[in-house]
Image (cartoon, rainbow, N blue to C red):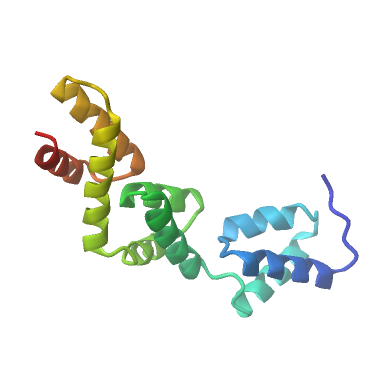
Amino acid sequence: MKKQVTSIEEVKRKLEHFCVYQDRCHKEVEKKLAEYHLIPETKEVILLHLFEHDFLNEERFAKSFARGKFRIKKWGKQRITRELKLRDISTYNIKTALKEIEEEDYIASLYELIEKKNQQVTEENLFKRKKKVIDFLRYRGYETELVFKAVNEVIA
């Protein structure tokens, strides 16, 4: 669907609003920009404007993404890393973003999820019960060694 645009300034304002509403990654902004069917030079001018005026900041995006996904969705570091890579975020910014997650909170969250999932699983067989909990935590993106250690402590 082609969007109706009257001027470059209007596109700039729309993309500024798009970036202010929520932190965005470069890929999301380029996708939004593609909807306007502009020539490459104009796209570059608009992207440069967004960078220069701090509407677009990959490091800030990565940090807020990591904090949000951990606090709200209880994702592990591996899942957050995978999702950031899908959005073409640099390795440096991914490492910086993961530092936003406090280690004590991370471990506490892992144990909280184990307790919660263990209560939900109705399986009687101990090994099958552990496997279901472990699979759930691995899907959430927690590290395998950490998951095995914690599950074996909690479910005995």
Q: In the displayed image of the protein, which residue is found farthest to the right?
A: 6
Q: Can residue 44 be seen in this view?
A: no
Residue name at image x 68 percent, y 64 percent: 18
Position of 139 relative to 19 (above/below) = above
Q: In this view, does 30 lie to the left or right of 100?
A: right
The N terminus, quarter of image? top right
The C terminus, quarter of image? top left
Q: In the displayed image of the protein, which residue is found farthest to the bottom?
A: 53
Position of 52 relative to 67 (above/below) = below
Residue name at image x 13 percent, y 35 percent: 155
Q: In this view, does 139 lie to the left or right of 7?
A: left
User: Residue 116 or 36: which is nearer the viewer?
Assistant: 116
Position of 135 relative to 32 (above/below) = above
Residue name at image x 16 percent, y 19 percent: 125
Give the percent coordinates (x, y) of residue 131.
22, 28
User: Residue 112 or 82: which is nearer the viewer?
Assistant: 112
Q: In this view, does 32 lie to the left or right of 38?
A: left
Give the percent coordinates (x, y) of residue 135.
28, 32
Q: Quadrant of residue 7?
A: bottom right
Image mark count: 0
Q: Is residue 12 visible?
A: yes
Residue name at image x 62 percent, y 79 percent: 52
Give the percent coordinates (x, y) of residue 57.
54, 70
Give the percent coordinates (x, y) of residue 61.
50, 65
